[in-house]
Image (cartoon, grey):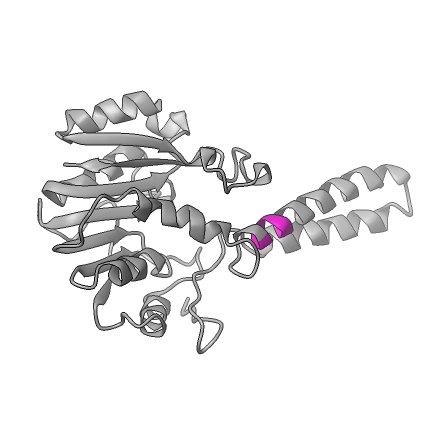
Amino acid sequence: MNARPKSKDQPDYGNWVSKKLIYVPGIVSLAFWGLAFLSLWWMLPAALFLCVAVYFGYARFLFSSRGKNIQARIRGLVLDHLDWKGEGQALDIGCGGGALVIELARQHPQAKVCGIDSWGEDWEYSQTVCEQNAQLEGVGERVIFRKGSASELPFDDESLDAVVSNLVFHEVKETPDKRELVREALRVLRKGGKFAFQDLFLFERSYGSPAELVETLRGWGMSRVEFIPTREATFIPHTLKLPFMVGTLGLLAGEK
């Protein structure tokens, strides 16, 4: 998929709520409403699917930059908890449309920032989108984007000064134990380097309890580890705090 920004003068960072989540239940609802002429019982599933379509439509609006911009604010929590002065090289794992890479470059003009992603067909992102977004944001000459996997990062041990990631680890299908993706991300971080990762860290089937996860990272040699439950951010409305939305999001931040 060679996705491109929707506008020539505005960056496109996508929306976490796909249009399919709105259109598909909406179409199914219409089909059931049609069947309601045969039996009123069909009105129940029709109403149910309509509610699903309306919910995801509202969620997409909340996430959108043209709506409440909640998506950007949640993403911004990663850098808010990255205690880094911007000296050296930084990596964003699973950079998507390049938003974190670009913001890192804007905040730290002296830093070298790289973003990697597999840019699979499930997402409306590509390396081209990232590069165009970077140019539109005025940092095109100071960032680099590479194709790569979070399971096996193309960097030497302890070669980077800061590593970030946002909502990526749970999507990596080839690594069932998501904690191993966190370990791989920390492998490339130098001693004294800073990290901030946001993912479904409150989903205990994947990560265990937050306390256990923090102890695991300490056991891997991290000198400082902090866990922050994203869902407690005051700007996130209750309608988005359901488990299948942002209800299981959390942040791991600290220093190696």
Q: Quadrant of residue 87?
A: bottom left
Residue 58 in the figure: left or right of residue 155? right
Residue 197: image x %, image y %?
30, 41
Q: Is residue 127 above or below residue 173?
A: below
Residue 8: image x %, image y %?
45, 78
> Is residue 238 at least partly visible in the picture?
yes
Residue 143: image x %, image y %?
23, 65
Q: Quadrant of residue 18?
A: bottom right
Residue 101 in the figure: left or right of residue 26? left
Magenta region includes residue 79:
no
Q: Is residue 113 above or below residue 198?
A: below
Q: Is residue 181 above or below residue 103?
A: above
Magenta region includes residue 58:
yes
Residue 134 in the figure: left or right of residue 1? left
The foreground one among 18 and 226 is 226
Q: Which quadrant is the C terminus positioned in?
A: top left
> Is residue 147 at least partly visible in the picture?
no
Q: Is residue 192 above or below residue 67?
A: above
Residue 189 in the figure: left or right of residue 2? left
Report the residue at 43% width, 61% height from top: 13
Report the residue at 67% width, 44% height from top: 52
Residue 117: image x %, image y %?
30, 56
Q: Which quadrant is the N terminus positioned in?
A: bottom left
Magenta span: predominant SS is helix
Task: Report the span colored magenta.
Answer: 57-61
